[in-house]
Amino acid sequence: MNASTLIDARIAVEIENQVDLIQYSGSLLKNLGAVEDEYTDAMLEREKAFSSYIGYGFALPHGTSDSMRFVRQDGLVFVRPKSPIVWHGETVHAAFALAANGTKHIEMLGMLADSLQAASEREWLLKCDSEADIRGFLSGIAS
């Protein structure tokens, strides 16, 4: 694992909508020490302009290029709500929130996209009952 990337995972979280999920993800990133408060606001603003729904029941909220100034350290979190939520008209079962500077942002987006192409990995992420195991998966993405 890249020691500079902070990771976390939460499953069966009581979340009702995409705003709550983005705020919760932002708080995880902040609690890890990855971002400043303003980064969550930037994720919400970005979501208003362009949906971060990426298909297969997953979303990938993240900030803009301008919001990278609020990133202290690269971070990647996974949040799986207890029940699916509606995300710009789509059903979302889980989300990855990303905070990264420079090219690491693009690298992690690519790794996540590659991983989600495999139906077996998507199914595992939606059924896994171990936050520690999901953090292990994220470690592979962040390395």
Image: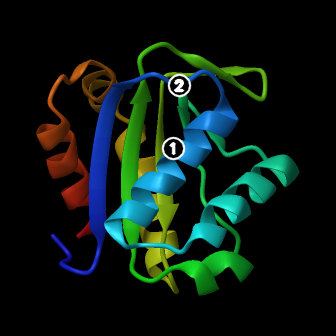
Task: Bin the neighbour count of mark 2 within 10 Å (Cα to Cα): few under 14, some 14-19, many 20 and up.
Answer: some
On the question of residue 111 being in view, the answer is no
Mark 2, secondary structure of its residue? loop
Q: In which quarter of the image is the C terminus?
A: bottom left
Rounded to the nearest angstrom, the CA distance separating label 1 from label 2 is 8 Å
Q: Position of residue 94 (x, y in %)?
A: 46, 30
Q: Nearer the viewer, residue 63 or 114?
A: 63
Which residue corresponds to the image point at 60% horizontal and 59% vertical from the top-left? 62
- The residue sitting at 38% across, 52% down in the picture is 77
Q: Residue 122 carries which label?
A: none
> Foreground: 55 or 17?
17
Expressed as whole percent of the image width and height from the top left, the position of residue 106 reads 52, 71
Residue 14: x %, y % from top left = 46, 22
Task: Please give the name of the residue rendered at 84% of the width and 48% of the height, measured from the top-left corner.
Answer: 48
Tell me: residue 72, above or below residue 53.
Answer: below
* Residue wearing tag 1: 24
Q: Mark 2 points at which residue?
A: 15
Label whose residue precedes the other's in the sequence (1 or 2): 2
Kind of residue at badge 1: Tyr
Q: Left of 41 or right of it: where is 111?
A: left
Label pair 1/2, CB-CB below 8 angstroms: yes
Based on the displayed image, in which of its 4 quarters is residue 54 positioned? top right
